[in-house]
Each structure stands twice: as C-alpha cells, then as structure tokens.
Image (spheres, rainbow, N blue to C red):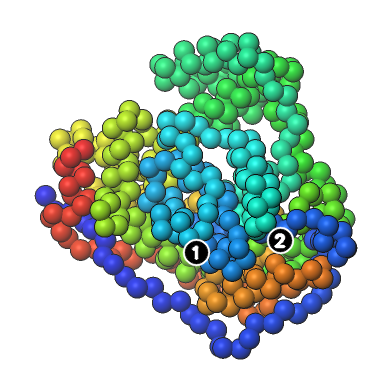
Amino acid sequence: MEMVMVGIRNIRIPCLPDAHVKLTRFRRSISCSSAAAAAKKRVVVISGPTGAGKTRIALQLAKRLNGEVISADSVQVYQGLDIGSAKPTPTERMEVPHHLIDILHPSGDYSVGQFYEDARQATTDILSGGRVPIVTGGTGLYLRWYIYGKPDVPKASSDITSEVHSELTRLQNIGDWYSAVQLVVESGDPKAQYLAANDWYRLRRSLEIIKACGLPPSAFEVPYDSFKHQRSSSVSNSSLVTQTSANALGDQSHDLDYDFICFFLTNQRVDLYRSIDLRCEDMLLGKPGCDGILGEAKWLLDVGLSPNSNSATRAIGYRQAMEYLERCRERQGQSSAGEFHAFLAEFQRASRNFAKRQLTWFRNENIYHWLDASKPLDKVLDFLTNAYYDQSGTMKVPECLRMRELKSRKEGSALKSYRTINSFTYIGTSSANRIVRKS
C-alpha cells in the first residue's frame, strides 16, 4: 500500500530594512497613570491564530526578560498530545520554565475555570520569584478570563455534585447526548442546547449551578462584560489595526489587578493559511523517533477514547486523525491514497477555519496591540522588550511592525481564490503507513 507523506520545506520570511526600531510615544489609555501602572506588576500576554509563531516569540522574549511562560492553550495541558498542539520541545522547556503543559491525562476534561485558577497561581509564583510572567496561547476564552476575571458562580455542594454525576453519567455511558441536553434545558438552562456535542463537563457544570442556586450559568455576569459596557465609544472601522483598538477600553484598566501588556501576532490571511496547510503536513511527518499526529491519535484510541468524546478528542487534528484511523481499522488497517488525501484536506480545512474564528474573536478584544508576525524576529523582540521596560504609560506599535487588515481588492481576490498546494512524497515504508497498518 502506498501512502502519501509530507516533504520537508524551508519557509522564507520577509525581512525589514536594518533600520533600528524606535518607540514613538503617544498616550496609551489602556494603562492608567504612570504612577498607578508602576504600582502594579506587569504581565505580558502574547496571542495569535494557530500557526502564527507565538510560541517561538514567547520563548525568545522570556530569555530576554528573565521570564517564565504560562501556556494558554487548551490542548497543551494534555499529556501525550505534543505534535498536534505544537508544544515547546523538552529542550526549550529546559531553557525556559513553562507552566500548564502536560498537567492532565487526555481522558480528563479541563475547563476555563480551572485554567483561571492554575494560571493565576502560576503568575503569583513567577512574580514571587522575581521573574516575568509571559502568557501565550490562542484560546480566547482562557485569556479573557485570565485578564478580566471569572464570573462569581456559586460552587456546588458535594451532594449536588454527586446527584448530577449520577444523573448524567447514566446517559453518558449509553451515549445519549440529546437526552442529557434536554434534561439540562428542562432544568432551566436553554443555552445548553448550543454546547458542543459531548461537552459533558460543561453540561454537568450547568446542571450543578442550576441545582445550587436555581439560575443558569448565563445569569452570572462575566467581568469582561462590565469592561465592555463601560467603553465610552467604539472603535471606528479602518484599513489599519491601529493602536486605537488597544486603547478602546479607556481608563477602566485601573480596575485590573495587573498591568497587562497584550499583543496579537498574525500574518496576512493568505500567508497564514499557507503556513497552516504546511504545518498540518509537518504534523503528519512528525519528528525523529515520533510518528506524528497519527501516532498520537492511535494512542488516544488505544487507551479507550473515541473521537469527539471529550475536550482532548475534540481538538482539531486529533479528532480528524482518530476518525481516519477508525475507518482504517474497519478495513484491517488499509487506506488508499485518496482516503489519506481526504483526511489531510479535512484537517487543513478545520485548522484554517479555527484560525479564522480566532481572528474574529480577537478583533473584539480591544486590549491587544496587533503585530505583523512576518517581520524579522529580532525586530519584533526588540519592540516587545522595549514595551515591557517602558514605564511611561505610553506605547505605540511602530508602523513597520503594525499589522494591516485585509482590505485591498487584490488581497481580497487572492483570499477568495485560495487553494491548498500540498507537497508530498510517496513512500511505502513511511511512518504514517506503519501507523495505519498497526492501527
């Protein structure tokens, strides 16, 4: 059986002229007065869509600032899911301490509330050690709660937790998601019907809250909403992602407990999509001694997990790979090249769509300064380093690093006509072929 495998490519990144990156100054209303900002500990937040290179930036910035990295990635928390979540390598994690990576077996569920508690504790520990917290990841809700706080939802008693577990576990064991949702809807949470299929953790939590106080989770205000409602004016549309967007919260930041400086790294959409497609190929190739994402997906199946059954198996890449391997198992480990192509195309499409959703989400997160991830690494790092040490309370992204929105007709046409261009080598003894046969 012949299998399609990924070739290895070098990706060239455009460079800027060697001009020194200078910080121009203007009023940064995301911070309060300089004196008040100085009284707070500073925390760096680096986000961006999948494939934008935020992990590399965070690692190098941590070396410059004597920092430690807190992962805000909903998949990196799971042990064994290394390739598909693009975890830092063991060597990189030895060079710079990382937090909230490999803390949970994939059979468990990890919630945004758990992330908030763990990430805030890690922040306290890092600052207590005299180092700089650098929070990086693309899980938008994680970062929103981390910055603004979590809703004050009552904690269920052990009796309620036990009761809910008994009610829903019976339905979960027979795979009756629909009946479980109807139970929660009829108990008082109509929004339960919009949960992702098989998100049993959130369904259980919703029922616990209802039983504890008689109200659904949506009845409790998220702290972010109060900041959003306090804005005196909205940001007007522009062909540029300007610093205005990062200042739209006005002076409400004095209510935040840290001096957050937040950055969003991305590329133009066509370049981002191309990078994502190639990244998916590389995840199939894996690394020396590693069978890639197919090997990790096989392991998930071998430990008794099913695709789309919990947080880990819903993750993009893993769900598609597990479903593909299940189909192969039904055929005694056989797969045609066409079936493999279809799996890869689905994986790439899901990844691009996820990046698009991330871009949409963070356009509404006005605390972020948008940076062009295609610019030279040293130039970006110079700016981020200067931004961290600047105590004036004023900051502006240099024009040469600022991320421009897609507006021109030419760019829009290129995006509409975008097509994946895969780079394959046919190798009968490839690692992917071995994994399919073993599965």
Residue 383: tell me if it is visible. Answer: yes
Rendered residue at 38%/60% (across/down): 279
Q: Between residues 195 and 298, which one lies in front from this camera angle?
A: 298
Near mark 2 (Cα within 10 A), the count class, few <14, some 14-19 or many ≥20, is: many
218 lies left or right of 249: left
Inter-mark Cα distance, 2 to 1? 18 Å
Residue 292, image x, y percentages = 30, 51
Q: What amino acid is at disc 2? A: Ile
**Above or below, comparing residue 433 to residue 195 in the picture:** below
- Side of 70 relative to 270 (left or right): right
- The kind of secondary structure element at disc 2 is strand
Q: Secondary structure at mark 1?
A: helix
The quadrant of the rendering that contains the C terminus is: top left
Question: On the image, numbered disc 1 is attached to which residue?
Answer: 56
Q: Identity of the amino acid at label 1?
A: Arg
- The residue located at (54%, 15%) in the rendering is 165
**According to the image, label 2 marks what residue?**
261
Residue drawn at x 49%, y 64% as measured from the top left:
56
Residue at x-position 63% and y-position 86%: 20
Relative to the observer, which residue lies in front, 336 or 425? 425
Image vertical order of residue 349 relative to residue 404, above or below: above
Sequence-first tag of 2 and 1: 1
Q: Position of residue 101 (x, y in %)?
A: 49, 46
Q: Quadrant of residue 162?
A: top right
Label 1 environment density (alpha carbons within 10 Å; few <14, some 14–19, many ≥20): few
- State the image coordinates of residue 19 (x, y, percent, origin top left): 61, 88
Left or right of 99 in this view: 87: left
- Position of residue 304 measured from the top left corner of the image (x, y, whole percent): 33, 28
